[in-house]
Image (tube, rainbow, N blue to C red):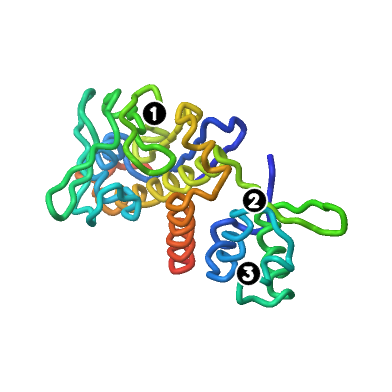
Protein backbone atom coordinates (compact mmCIF):
# COMPACT_ATOMS: atom_id res chain seq x y z
CA UNK A 1 0.00 0.00 0.00
CA UNK A 2 1.23 3.46 -0.84
CA UNK A 3 1.90 5.95 1.87
CA UNK A 4 2.32 9.67 1.62
CA UNK A 5 3.65 12.13 4.12
CA UNK A 6 1.19 14.86 3.17
CA UNK A 7 -2.55 14.41 3.20
CA UNK A 8 -3.84 15.30 -0.29
CA UNK A 9 -6.81 17.10 1.22
CA UNK A 10 -4.55 19.38 3.18
CA UNK A 11 -2.16 19.78 0.28
CA UNK A 12 -5.00 21.28 -1.75
CA UNK A 13 -6.28 23.53 1.01
CA UNK A 14 -3.83 26.22 -0.14
CA UNK A 15 -5.38 28.31 -2.95
CA UNK A 16 -2.10 28.93 -4.75
CA UNK A 17 -1.12 25.29 -4.59
CA UNK A 18 -4.53 24.44 -5.97
CA UNK A 19 -3.80 26.68 -8.95
CA UNK A 20 -0.47 24.98 -9.47
CA UNK A 21 -2.17 21.60 -9.29
CA UNK A 22 -4.92 22.68 -11.68
CA UNK A 23 -2.23 23.80 -14.14
CA UNK A 24 -0.49 20.42 -13.91
CA UNK A 25 -3.83 18.66 -14.20
CA UNK A 26 -4.45 20.59 -17.40
CA UNK A 27 -1.43 19.06 -19.05
CA UNK A 28 2.11 18.08 -18.11
CA UNK A 29 4.39 21.03 -17.68
CA UNK A 30 7.68 22.28 -16.30
CA UNK A 31 8.30 24.65 -13.40
CA UNK A 32 9.15 27.36 -15.93
CA UNK A 33 5.84 26.93 -17.73
CA UNK A 34 3.84 27.04 -14.52
CA UNK A 35 5.67 30.15 -13.36
CA UNK A 36 4.95 31.73 -16.74
CA UNK A 37 1.23 30.91 -16.65
CA UNK A 38 0.59 31.83 -13.03
CA UNK A 39 1.46 34.86 -10.91
CA UNK A 40 3.79 32.72 -8.81
CA UNK A 41 7.58 32.84 -8.66
CA UNK A 42 9.65 29.85 -9.76
CA UNK A 43 10.93 29.06 -6.25
CA UNK A 44 7.36 29.19 -4.92
CA UNK A 45 6.16 26.92 -7.73
CA UNK A 46 8.91 24.44 -6.86
CA UNK A 47 7.85 24.45 -3.23
CA UNK A 48 4.22 23.84 -4.07
CA UNK A 49 5.20 21.03 -6.42
CA UNK A 50 7.23 19.41 -3.67
CA UNK A 51 4.14 19.32 -1.44
CA UNK A 52 2.01 17.97 -4.30
CA UNK A 53 4.64 15.27 -4.93
CA UNK A 54 4.61 14.33 -1.25
CA UNK A 55 0.84 14.10 -1.33
CA UNK A 56 1.16 11.87 -4.42
CA UNK A 57 -1.10 14.14 -6.39
CA UNK A 58 1.50 14.67 -9.10
CA UNK A 59 4.59 12.90 -10.32
CA UNK A 60 7.58 14.04 -12.26
CA UNK A 61 9.64 12.62 -15.09
CA UNK A 62 12.67 13.72 -17.02
CA UNK A 63 12.25 14.55 -20.68
CA UNK A 64 15.45 15.71 -22.31
CA UNK A 65 16.72 18.54 -20.15
CA UNK A 66 13.34 19.23 -18.61
CA UNK A 67 11.60 17.88 -15.57
CA UNK A 68 7.92 17.60 -16.41
CA UNK A 69 5.13 17.33 -13.88
CA UNK A 70 1.87 15.53 -14.52
CA UNK A 71 -1.19 14.58 -12.47
CA UNK A 72 -0.93 11.29 -10.69
CA UNK A 73 -4.49 10.90 -9.55
CA UNK A 74 -6.03 8.37 -11.89
CA UNK A 75 -9.73 8.43 -12.48
CA UNK A 76 -10.84 5.50 -10.41
CA UNK A 77 -8.47 6.38 -7.62
CA UNK A 78 -9.83 9.92 -7.62
CA UNK A 79 -13.35 8.61 -7.26
CA UNK A 80 -12.28 6.20 -4.52
CA UNK A 81 -10.61 8.91 -2.52
CA UNK A 82 -13.59 11.16 -2.87
CA UNK A 83 -16.07 8.50 -1.78
CA UNK A 84 -13.80 7.42 1.04
CA UNK A 85 -13.79 10.95 2.31
CA UNK A 86 -17.57 11.16 1.91
CA UNK A 87 -18.18 8.00 3.95
CA UNK A 88 -15.56 8.83 6.58
CA UNK A 89 -17.32 12.12 7.18
CA UNK A 90 -20.68 10.40 7.26
CA UNK A 91 -19.56 7.81 9.81
CA UNK A 92 -17.88 10.42 11.98
CA UNK A 93 -21.08 12.47 12.09
CA UNK A 94 -23.06 9.30 12.61
CA UNK A 95 -20.97 8.47 15.68
CA UNK A 96 -21.54 11.95 17.12
CA UNK A 97 -25.28 11.84 16.58
CA UNK A 98 -25.65 8.23 17.76
CA UNK A 99 -23.76 8.82 20.98
CA UNK A 100 -25.40 12.17 21.70
CA UNK A 101 -28.89 10.79 21.26
CA UNK A 102 -28.37 7.64 23.29
CA UNK A 103 -29.65 7.58 26.82
CA UNK A 104 -29.89 4.24 28.53
CA UNK A 105 -33.55 3.95 29.54
CA UNK A 106 -32.85 1.68 32.47
CA UNK A 107 -29.82 1.69 34.73
CA UNK A 108 -27.36 -1.06 33.93
CA UNK A 109 -27.90 -4.11 36.14
CA UNK A 110 -25.78 -4.20 39.24
CA UNK A 111 -22.27 -5.43 38.81
CA UNK A 112 -22.35 -4.87 35.05
CA UNK A 113 -19.74 -2.58 33.64
CA UNK A 114 -19.72 -0.88 30.27
CA UNK B 1 -11.83 4.77 12.18
CA UNK B 2 -9.88 2.70 9.73
CA UNK B 3 -9.84 2.40 5.99
CA UNK B 4 -8.29 -0.19 3.71
CA UNK B 5 -7.15 0.15 0.15
CA UNK B 6 -6.26 -3.14 -1.51
CA UNK B 7 -8.83 -3.52 -4.24
CA UNK B 8 -9.23 -0.33 -6.21
CA UNK B 9 -12.84 -1.04 -7.07
CA UNK B 10 -14.00 -1.02 -3.46
CA UNK B 11 -13.40 0.77 -0.21
CA UNK B 12 -14.11 0.04 3.41
CA UNK B 13 -14.58 2.40 6.31
CA UNK B 14 -15.56 1.39 9.80
CA UNK B 15 -16.21 3.00 13.13
CA UNK B 16 -17.13 1.87 16.64
CA UNK B 17 -19.85 3.68 18.53
CA UNK B 18 -20.77 3.42 22.20
CA UNK B 19 -24.43 2.62 21.71
CA UNK B 20 -26.46 -0.60 21.33
CA UNK B 21 -26.84 -2.04 17.85
CA UNK B 22 -30.56 -1.19 17.63
CA UNK B 23 -29.89 2.45 18.41
CA UNK B 24 -27.03 2.58 15.92
CA UNK B 25 -29.16 1.19 13.11
CA UNK B 26 -32.01 3.52 13.97
CA UNK B 27 -29.84 6.62 13.97
CA UNK B 28 -28.21 5.69 10.68
CA UNK B 29 -31.48 5.09 8.89
CA UNK B 30 -33.78 7.58 10.61
CA UNK B 31 -31.35 10.48 10.98
CA UNK B 32 -29.40 10.07 7.77
CA UNK B 33 -30.41 13.65 7.09
CA UNK B 34 -28.15 14.81 9.91
CA UNK B 35 -25.16 12.69 9.09
CA UNK B 36 -24.87 13.03 5.34
CA UNK B 37 -22.27 15.61 4.23
CA UNK B 38 -24.24 18.60 3.02
CA UNK B 39 -21.91 19.95 0.39
CA UNK B 40 -22.62 16.96 -1.80
CA UNK B 41 -25.65 18.36 -3.51
CA UNK B 42 -27.02 17.35 -6.89
CA UNK B 43 -29.83 19.91 -6.80
CA UNK B 44 -29.44 23.44 -8.04
CA UNK B 45 -30.70 24.86 -4.73
CA UNK B 46 -29.57 24.17 -1.15
CA UNK B 47 -30.83 20.94 0.40
CA UNK B 48 -33.55 21.32 2.99
CA UNK B 49 -33.53 17.71 4.05
CA UNK B 50 -32.58 14.20 3.00
CA UNK B 51 -35.02 11.34 3.34
CA UNK B 52 -34.12 7.65 3.61
CA UNK B 53 -37.18 5.49 3.05
CA UNK B 54 -36.63 2.61 5.47
CA UNK B 55 -37.66 -0.40 3.38
CA UNK B 56 -36.30 -2.44 0.48
CA UNK B 57 -37.50 -0.74 -2.68
CA UNK B 58 -37.38 2.68 -1.06
CA UNK B 59 -35.06 5.46 -2.12
CA UNK B 60 -32.86 8.09 -0.56
CA UNK B 61 -33.70 11.53 -1.85
CA UNK B 62 -32.72 15.11 -1.19
CA UNK B 63 -35.39 17.79 -0.98
CA UNK B 64 -34.32 21.27 -2.01
CA UNK B 65 -35.46 24.47 -0.29
CA UNK B 66 -37.75 25.08 -3.29
CA UNK B 67 -39.34 21.64 -2.98
CA UNK B 68 -37.38 20.04 -5.82
CA UNK B 69 -36.32 16.45 -5.31
CA UNK B 70 -33.38 14.30 -6.25
CA UNK B 71 -33.36 10.54 -5.60
CA UNK B 72 -29.77 9.34 -5.66
CA UNK B 73 -29.92 5.90 -4.04
CA UNK B 74 -32.20 2.86 -3.87
CA UNK B 75 -32.61 0.88 -0.69
CA UNK B 76 -31.77 -2.69 -1.71
CA UNK B 77 -31.73 -4.40 1.68
CA UNK B 78 -33.21 -3.13 4.94
CA UNK B 79 -32.68 -5.60 7.76
CA UNK B 80 -32.86 -3.90 11.15
CA UNK B 81 -30.74 -3.82 13.19
CA UNK B 82 -27.87 -5.46 11.32
CA UNK B 83 -27.72 -4.63 7.67
CA UNK B 84 -28.51 -1.92 5.15
CA UNK B 85 -27.58 -2.05 1.46
CA UNK B 86 -28.14 0.86 -0.88
CA UNK B 87 -27.26 1.53 -4.47
CA UNK B 88 -25.12 4.54 -5.34
CA UNK B 89 -26.82 6.11 -8.32
CA UNK B 90 -24.40 8.99 -8.65
CA UNK B 91 -21.94 9.17 -11.51
CA UNK B 92 -18.34 10.25 -10.93
CA UNK B 93 -19.37 13.62 -12.33
CA UNK B 94 -21.87 13.95 -9.51
CA UNK B 95 -24.98 13.55 -11.59
CA UNK B 96 -27.75 11.05 -11.08
CA UNK B 97 -27.01 7.84 -12.99
CA UNK B 98 -30.26 6.49 -14.47
CA UNK B 99 -28.74 3.18 -15.66
CA UNK B 100 -28.68 0.69 -12.73
CA UNK B 101 -25.92 -1.28 -14.48
CA UNK B 102 -23.69 1.71 -14.04
CA UNK B 103 -24.25 2.17 -10.33
CA UNK B 104 -22.24 0.89 -7.38
CA UNK B 105 -23.37 -0.53 -4.07
CA UNK B 106 -22.92 0.38 -0.41
CA UNK B 107 -23.39 -2.16 2.36
CA UNK B 108 -23.48 -1.07 5.98
CA UNK B 109 -23.26 -3.76 8.65
CA UNK B 110 -24.00 -3.18 12.32
CA UNK B 111 -22.29 -5.65 14.63
CA UNK B 112 -22.89 -5.67 18.39
CA UNK B 113 -19.51 -5.92 20.11
CA UNK B 114 -21.07 -5.59 23.56
CA UNK B 115 -24.65 -4.72 24.56
CA UNK B 116 -23.60 -1.07 24.49
CA UNK B 117 -21.01 -0.96 21.75
CA UNK B 118 -21.50 -1.42 18.03
CA UNK B 119 -19.08 -1.69 15.17
CA UNK B 120 -20.38 -0.17 11.97
CA UNK B 121 -18.60 -1.41 8.86
CA UNK B 122 -19.29 0.23 5.54
CA UNK B 123 -18.23 -1.18 2.21
CA UNK B 124 -18.68 0.71 -1.05
CA UNK B 125 -18.10 -1.79 -3.86
CA UNK B 126 -18.23 -2.24 -7.63
CA UNK B 127 -16.88 1.25 -8.25
CA UNK B 128 -15.71 0.06 -11.66
CA UNK B 129 -19.33 -0.21 -12.75
CA UNK B 130 -19.37 3.56 -13.07
CA UNK B 131 -17.25 3.02 -16.16
CA UNK B 132 -16.38 5.85 -18.49
CA UNK B 133 -17.23 8.53 -15.99
CA UNK B 134 -14.25 7.85 -13.78
CA UNK B 135 -11.99 7.21 -16.72
CA UNK B 136 -12.91 10.71 -17.76
CA UNK B 137 -11.22 12.00 -14.64
CA UNK B 138 -7.86 11.02 -16.08
CA UNK B 139 -8.06 13.66 -18.77
CA UNK B 140 -8.85 16.27 -16.12
CA UNK B 141 -9.51 18.96 -18.66
CA UNK B 142 -13.28 18.65 -18.63
CA UNK B 143 -14.28 22.23 -17.89
CA UNK B 144 -16.97 21.63 -15.29
CA UNK B 145 -15.90 18.44 -13.61
CA UNK B 146 -12.49 19.28 -12.38
CA UNK B 147 -12.95 22.64 -10.63
CA UNK B 148 -15.92 21.19 -8.76
CA UNK B 149 -13.76 18.30 -7.69
CA UNK B 150 -11.15 20.70 -6.41
CA UNK B 151 -13.82 22.70 -4.69
CA UNK B 152 -14.85 19.67 -2.70
CA UNK B 153 -11.27 18.99 -1.73
CA UNK B 154 -11.10 22.54 -0.46
CA UNK B 155 -14.32 22.41 1.51
CA UNK B 156 -13.30 19.20 3.21
CA UNK B 157 -9.77 20.31 3.91
CA UNK B 158 -10.97 23.57 5.39
CA UNK B 159 -13.48 21.89 7.60
CA UNK B 160 -10.84 19.49 8.84
CA UNK B 161 -8.61 22.43 9.59
CA UNK B 162 -11.42 24.15 11.52
CA UNK B 163 -12.26 21.00 13.42
CA UNK B 164 -8.67 20.35 14.37
Residue pointed to by mark 2: A71
Residue A114 visible in the snapshot? no
> In the rendered structure, the residue with mark 3 lies on which chain?
A
- Between the residue at mark 2 and the residue at mark 1, the CA separation in whole angstroms equals 26 Å
Residue pointed to by mark 3: A37
Residue pointed to by mark 1: B103
Towards the viewer: B123 or A60: A60
Q: Is residue B53 left or right of residue B98?
A: left
The percent coordinates of residue B121 (x first, y second) are 44, 35
> In the rendered structure, the residue with mark 2 lies on which chain?
A
Q: Is residue B53 left or right of residue B101?
A: left
Whether tag 3 and tag 2 are in contact, CB under 8 A, the answer is no
Please, what secondary structure does the residue beneath circle 1 have? loop
Quadrant housing residue A28 = bottom right
- Between the residue at mark 3 and the residue at mark 2, the CA separation in whole angstroms equals 17 Å
| Numbered disc in front, either 1 or 3 | 3
Q: Are marks 3 and 2 on the same chain?
A: yes
Q: Which residue is pictured at 28% across the width and 54% down the height? A: A100
> In the rendered structure, the residue with mark 1 lies on which chain?
B
Q: Is residue A31 left or right of residue B95?
A: right
Q: Are marks 2 and 1 on the same chain?
A: no
Q: Which residue is pictured at 55% across the width and 62% down the height? A: A12
Amino acid sequence: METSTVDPWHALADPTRRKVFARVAHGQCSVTEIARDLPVSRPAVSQHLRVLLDAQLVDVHQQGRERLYRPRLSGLEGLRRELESYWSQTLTRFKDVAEQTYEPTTPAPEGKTR
Amino acid sequence: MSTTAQDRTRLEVDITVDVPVEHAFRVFTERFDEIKPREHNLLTVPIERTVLEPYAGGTIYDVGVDGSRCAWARVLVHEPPHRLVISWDISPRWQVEPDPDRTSEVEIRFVAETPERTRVALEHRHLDRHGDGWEGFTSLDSGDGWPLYLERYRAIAEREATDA
